Image (cartoon, grey):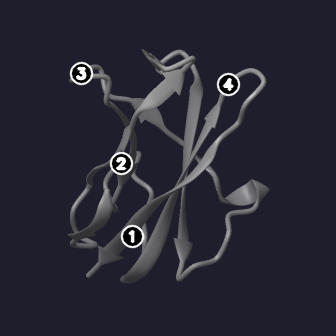
Amino acid sequence: MASIAKSRLDTSFVQVPVQAIVDGKSYDPTADVVKLAFMAGWALPGSGDWHAGQWSTSAAAGIYLAQCLVGPGTGGLNLAAGTYTVWVQITDNPEVPVINAGTLAVT
C-alpha cells in the first residue's frame, strides 16, 4: 500500500495487498479473519482500535486484498483529516501477523 490519500468526503474501500506464504508456497488467507486499524501518526494499535475488514473476491498472482470501508457514508469508518498508519491483523492458527501497511492521508 505504501502511501495513499483520500478525501474525508469519500466513502470507499482502503485496500491492502497481502501475500501469504506457507512452506514456500502461496497460501490463500481469505478464510482467515482480517481486521484493520488506522492510527494517528505512528501509534501502535490496541485491542479497541481494530475494525472488521473483509477480503476482496479477486486475487491476482497470489496477492489478496484486505479491505475496510472508510468514509462518512453508511457503514464506513469516519476518519478526521490527518495522517494515519494503516495496520492489518490476520488471525490464523497459530499465527496472528500484524502488518504495518503504510500510511493513509485523509484531507
Q: Which label's residue is closer to the chain start, 2 or 3?
A: 3
Residue ID for mark 4: 92
Q: Residue at x 45, y 74 (%)?
A: 84
x, y percentage for residue 28?
A: 44, 16
Q: Quadrant of residue 32?
A: top right
Foreground label between 1 and 2: 1
Residue type, numbered disc 2: Thr
x, y percentage for residue 14?
A: 32, 51
Residue ID for mark 2: 74
x, y percentage for residue 68?
A: 41, 45
CA separation in Å, label 1 and label 3: 23 Å
Q: Which label's residue is closer to the chain start, 1 or 4?
A: 4
Q: Secondary structure at mark 1?
A: strand
Residue 80 seen by the camera: no
Residue type, numbered disc 4: Asp
Q: Residue at x 32, y 23 (%)?
A: 62
Q: What is the number of the mark on residue 103?
A: 1
Query: Quick check: 77 left or right of 89?
Result: left
Q: Secondary structure at mark 2?
A: loop
Residue ID for mark 3: 58
Query: Quick check: 95 left or right of 76?
Result: right
88 or 53: nearer the viewer: 88
Q: Which label's residue is closer to the chain start, 1 or 3?
A: 3
Q: Are marks 1 and 3 in contact (CB under 8 Å)?
A: no
Location of the N terminus (image quadrant)? bottom left
Residue type, numbered disc 3: Ser
